[in-house]
Every structure is written in structure tokens, then in C-alpha cells.
Amino acid sequence: MGNPKAFLTVPRKEAGYRPVHDRINDFSEVEQTLNSGDRRLQASRCMDCGIPFCHWACPIGNKQPEWQDLLYKGRWKEAFYVLEETCDFPEFTGRICPAPCEKSCVLMLSANEPVTIRENEVSIIEAAFREGYVKPVQPVRNGKTVAVIGSGPAGLTVANRLNRKGYTVVVFEKEELPGGLLRYGIPNFKLSKTIIDRRIDLMKKEGIEFRLNAMVGNDISTKEIVDSFDAVCVAIGSEIPRDLKVEGRNLKGVYFALELLSQQNRILEGISVPPKNIINAKGKKVLVIGGGDTGSDCVGTANRHGAASVTQIEIMPKPPVGFNPGTPWPAWPQVLRTSSSHEEGCVRRWCLTTNRFIGEKNTLKAVEIEEVEWIPGENGGRPIMKPTGKTEIIEADLVFLSMGFVHPEQEGLLQELKLATNDRKNISVNSSQQTSSEKVFACGDATTGASLVVRAMASGKKTAKAIDHYLQS
Ligand SMILES: Cc1cc2nc3c(=O)[nH]c(=O)nc-3n(C[C@H](O)[C@H](O)[C@H](O)COP(=O)(O)OP(=O)(O)OC[C@H]3O[C@@H](n4cnc5c(N)ncnc54)[C@H](O)[C@@H]3O)c2cc1C
Ligand code: SF4
């Protein structure tokens, strides 16, 4: 611990976002950076607690106090080495992790001003790339081969770890570019795609082969994969969005969130989209159904298109503001979150269900919503939703359904690989991420359901270790 009094004298300082009037006109990253002097001061606030709850809360087990101390002392290179021991891609987590570590920081409890752990993390890896500390490693090959199906954060973590251990790794990806939801889900204003390209280039230089436009079970048979590799890792994500099968669902103007978000990312990438398929919110009244992060990303995208109005509705009650006694420190607090996209302009409403979509000439014009009440479940069980009969018609030209994802998309692939699914229809794995099929492992959202980048990476780390163990025994 470099400066034992800094937590008393240095306040938390966030880099903050670009001003709304500026950022709303483009899709560039909204978050700014601090200069290196301020960044080091922020790192000095870490108290190196006897029990580092930040470390406990981080799904990949980052050693935050250690790299904060090195960062404070200006030993950026060593900070990078400690960080990369546990985190394969700090440039992703440092930008888009919701940072449960910060919610568990003791300075969150005592002063509501946790250390800026996430921002410090990204500043270390960006300095490492800038200064040339990140260099391609050239592992000694051990003669064994691994196929990774899917190039999202889970698959990339497995590939990275096993490649560096000497396995020959091939990543199969059905899309035209690698990255999974990092590439085709998360908007560029949260994560620039040049950041993914930089990492993929490095992984290629280290010997990983990416086969793109290669859908396993379609473009390549699963038998060929299983027969050709010593182990297989299925990291195909959880791609089926939850639908809202109410009257008018097929009207023109009602889309899944990812239809908008992945198309927008493709357009920004220069990938051509047929004009008749383009979804653009310019001048439109937009309704986002679902109050989570994916919905918030639709809000930010619609505002950048120049929507006339944006409303986001959620079926659950509004969470408490600031503090929730039901989720006390150091747990992840279930409280109201306001994203950069919400700040850019959006009406947010809660306790609303959607009864029907109303159209004219097969085109969406309005949506009937209804207030609901939530009654506590018996014996502390799940709350029960009760419609109130209070309905309302709101005008809408575009609706984006952002109500989560249900399970992996490809029943065919799962059957061909003889992979069992659990009752939530995620791929079943044992404690070593091993499936019911010989030499086939699985990880990420495909096994847990839709989650977070950092959790997908944690699952990838565990799976890489299990595959290594399997291939060594
Ligand atoms: C809109 C949106 C915003 C999000 N924002 C955040 C955020 O800000 N922070 C955060 O932490 N998390 C966020 N998440 C969640 C996060 O993106 C996911 O939890 C994470 O990407 C899951 O990683 P994964 O590798 O398991 O799957 P994915 O990222 O879904 O990757 C799976 C990959 O497998 C490929 N694939 C599927 N089937 C095949 C096949 N048969 N053959 C070859 N390839 C195949 C897919 O094309 C895809 O590239 C967001 C999610 C969405 C939808
Ligand atoms: S990965 Fe997320 S939880 Fe872990 S240290 Fe970074 S910001 Fe915190």
C-alpha cells in the first residue's frame, strides 16, 4: 500500500462521459480518460484491505490491491503483468464490466466513494499496448489440438489460455467477424470494435487460427470437428431472444433488440445491409420493452439515429434509488441504474406489461400497456404479478423487445454433439465444464444463460483449465 492516507485526502474522480450534445452525434466511445497523474492518484486510494472484498467480488479473481499499488507507484509494466495473470482481456472488462468489485470496495461502504477499479484496469492495459509491453508470445507446441466453437469472450478466453499452453487452437465462428456479442451486440459507443480487432490480431500472431463464416453443424459437420481435434469447446452463447407473443407481434416496426443493435454495428463496420432491411429510428416514436442493459443500448442507438421520442418500459417495479436494504454491502446492490444512454434522453417507466401492438396497414402505430402490481409471494417466494386493468395506449412507430434470452439457438448442433440441456435449456456441464459427450466441453452464456462478459471469461478460464487437465491425463 503506497499511500496509507490517500483514501482520506483524495476523493474519487471518474473520467466521466463526453458531453451529451457531443456524443449523441456519433457512435464513438462515450467514456473519457484521466491523465496518468490523476489516474495514479486514484490508484493511491486503495487501502489494501486485509480482506480484499473487491477480489472476492470479481468473477475472474483480479488482484486489484496489487495492481493499484503498482499503478500508484508508476510501475505500469508490472501492474500490467499482474493484471494479465488473471484477466485475459482487460481492455474489454475495463470498458464494459459493471464492476461488482467497486460495489464491494470498503470505500463504497464507508464513504460511498469506491476506488475507480474498472477505469484503473483499462488505463493499465491501454498503457501496456501503447508502450509496447503487450507482445505476441510464441508458445512451444505440444502436438495436441483444440477446436473452439464460438468467438465471444468465453471462446476467446479458452482459445487464449490453451494456445499459450502450447495447444494448437482453431476457433470456428459463424459470423463474418470474431467477437460474439462484443462485436454484434454491445454498441460501439460502449466498446469500439478497433479494441476487439487489436486483440484478435495479437491472438492470430500468437498462432490461433480463426475460421470465419464457419457455422459448425452447417458449414462444417460436427463429426468432422469431433474427429479432427483432441478436445472441443462449445462456446456458442445464448442467442434466442425472449419473445412477446401478443396480438400484433408480426406488425412491421416490432423488432428484437439485437436486430437493431447487430445491424447498427454491421453498418458501422462497413458491412452492407440491404436498404429495405435497414432499421432506422430517425423521426420515429420508439418504445423499448425491457428495462435492462440491452434495452438501454437500444435507447442510446435510437437517440443517435435522431428518434422523435424514446420510452423504455419495464414489467418489474422501479428499484430503490441509492441503497437497497435487501442487498447490503458487499453484495451486488439491486438499485436503480442510470446509464450514459439514459442520460441522453429517455422516459423510463415501471410496473407496465404489454397487452397488444396496434397497427394500420400491417404497420405499428401504437401499443396497449397495462399497469401491474407485484404481490409478495407466500413464505418469501417469488412475487406474483397482478394486472390492475388500468390500460393506456401509447403511440409508437418502432418497438424493440429487450426481455432477455432463453437458451442456445441450435438444437441440431446440441443433438449432433449429444449435449444434454438442463430444464432452462442451457447446455448441461459438470463442475469441470465437461458435457455429456466425450471430449466436449462447454462454457459461457451457452451453459449459464445470458450473463456478463466477465462471467463468460471466468467460465472460459475454468474450462481452459479443465481441458488442459483432460488432455494431460
Ligand atoms: C446488447 C447487449 C449488451 C450487453 N452489454 C454488456 C455489457 O455492457 N457488459 C457486460 O459485461 N455484458 C454485456 N452483455 C452480455 C455479454 O455480451 C454476454 O454475456 C457475453 O458476450 C457472453 O459471451 P459468450 O462467449 O458466452 O457468448 P457470445 O458473446 O454470444 O458469443 C457466442 C459466439 O458463438 C458463435 N456461434 C454460435 N453458434 C455457432 C456455431 N454453430 N458455429 C460457430 N459459431 C457459432 C456466435 O456467432 C457468437 O459469435 C450484453 C449483451 C447484449 C445482448
Ligand atoms: S473484471 Fe470487473 S469485477 Fe473484475 S476487477 Fe475488473 S471491473 Fe472489477
Image: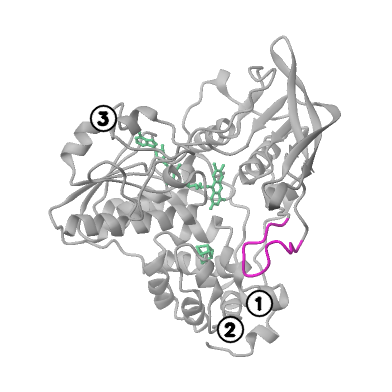
Residue at the extreme bottom: 4
Would residue 126 be counted in the magenta stretch? Answer: no
Q: Residues within 10 Å of mark 1 (few under 14, many from 20)?
A: some
Return the mark for residue 220.
3
Disc 1 under 8 Å from ligand 2? The reply is no
SS label for mark 3 = loop
Q: Is residue 285 visible?
A: no
What element does badge 1 sit on? helix
Residue 160 appears in the rendering: yes
Q: Residue at x 48, y 46 (%)?
A: 182
Outermost residue on the front side: it is: 379
* Residue named by callout 2: 47
Q: Which amino acid type is shown beneath numbered disc 1?
A: Leu
Residue 357 as seen in the image, left or right of residue 74: right
Does mark 3 have its CB less than 8 Å from ligand 1? yes
Mark 1 to mark 3 CA distance (whole Å): 52 Å
What span is in magenta?
322-335
What amino acid is at disc 2? Met
Residue at 50% across / 82% down in the picture? 69
For mark 1, what is the residue? 107
Outermost residue, top direction? 361
Sequence-wise first label, 2 or 3: 2
User: Disc 2 vs disc 3: Cβ atoms closer than 8 Å?
Assistant: no
x, y (%) of residue 3?
A: 58, 89
Q: From the top left corner, tell me how far across and down residue 111 is, in percent.
A: 72, 77
Disc 2 crowd, CA 10 A, few/some/many (<14, 14-19, 20+): many
Which quadrant of the rendered structure holds the C terminus? bottom left
